[in-house]
Image (tube, rainbow, N blue to C red):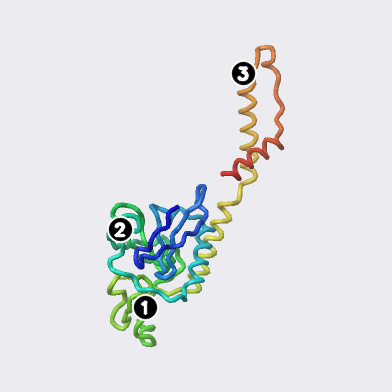
Amino acid sequence: MKPLPCPSCRQTMTKHRFERLLHGEVVLDLCFQCQGIWFDDFESVQITPGGIIELFKQLHEHHDDQRLPLRDPLQCPRCNEKLLHGLDVAKHGGKFNYHRCLQKHGRFTTFAQFMIEKGFVRQLNPAEIDELSAKVGIIRCMGCGAPVDIRKDHACSHCRAPITILDSGAVEQALSRYQHAEVRRTTRDVELLGDAIVMREREKSRLKRMKQEPENAGIIDTIDLISAGAEFVWHLIKR
């Protein structure tokens, strides 16, 4: 798989593999210098809950790294065209920024904006921003890295990203949510699995009898549920 240049610094991004929801894996391109992720197509919503937790761990390990400011314009790593700025509403609340390719090659999202999208980061309300501004005048935007004077602005004047913090409560809730989702995703219902095995073997037996000679049509085949079950579970595991 061909390495891709970062849309901002143009250095080669590193590839990281995460489990895909249906089958296979999602290969993401990460630039730790610019703290950005390149998503092809709809890769952001195709990662399993366990994969999101693993990705969050990797991002968190680099959250204190020296970060390069994002360039303007950002370029698509596949066609080199200018990326268009976008704003979307996160499923778990708040808004997040990204930059997408008009040719539908994918989108570029900073680590912070991805964490907003997945619910790890909480946006501050106006009262909290006012309280924070009395202690800290200027902060760094989690969207583009630009300085934001929160004494007069409640959003970044460059990318319009809202003021956000990595809140321990939000992180705990998000981790719990994804952990439970991963357990549900990977846990098989034993009763339903048993019913499926029996129904599958009955159907196989019926089809076999239909192919038999008339003199053997009345013979009923026995069903080996142990071997059938093992075969069925193996096919589930391989998917």
SS under mark 1? strand
Q: Is residue 93 visible?
A: no
Left or right of 50? Residue 74 is left
Q: Looking at numbered disc 2 in the image, what kind of residue is underneath it?
A: Asn
Q: Is residue 161 above or below residue 49?
A: below
Sequence-wise, which precedes: disc 3 or disc 2? 2
The percent position of residue 21, horizontal first and vertical second, equals: 50, 51
Residue 218, above or below 167: above
Crowding around mark 1 (Cα neighbors within 10 Å: few <14, some 14 to 19, many 20+) is some
- Given the current orientation, which residue lies at the most extreme bottom position? 135
In this view, the residue in front, 16 or 230, is 16
| Crowd class of label 2 (few under 14; some 14 to 19; many from 20; radius 10 Å) | few
For this view, does 164 lie left or right of residue 54? left
Q: Position of residue 174 (x, y in %)?
A: 50, 65
Instruction: Please tell me in which quadrant of the rendered image residue 159 appears.
Output: bottom left
Which numbered disc covers residue 140?
Answer: 1
In the image, 58: left or right of 144? right
- Judging depth in this view, the residue of 46 and 174 nearest the camera is 46
For residue 167, above or below residue 198: below
Q: Nearer the viewer, residue 26 or 192?
A: 26
| In the displayed structure image, the side of residue 218 where residue 121 appears, left or right | left
Name which residue lies at 45% across and 58% down.
Answer: 28
Please name the residue shown 55% across and 56% down the image.
182
Q: CA distance from mark 3 to mark 2?
A: 61 Å
Q: Nearer the viewer, mark 1 or mark 3?
A: 1
The residue wearing badge 3 is 211
> Residue 170 in the image: x percent, y percent?
48, 70
Q: Residue at x 29, y 52 (%)?
A: 103
> Which residue is labeled 2 in the image?
80
Quadrant location of the C terminus in the rendered image: top right
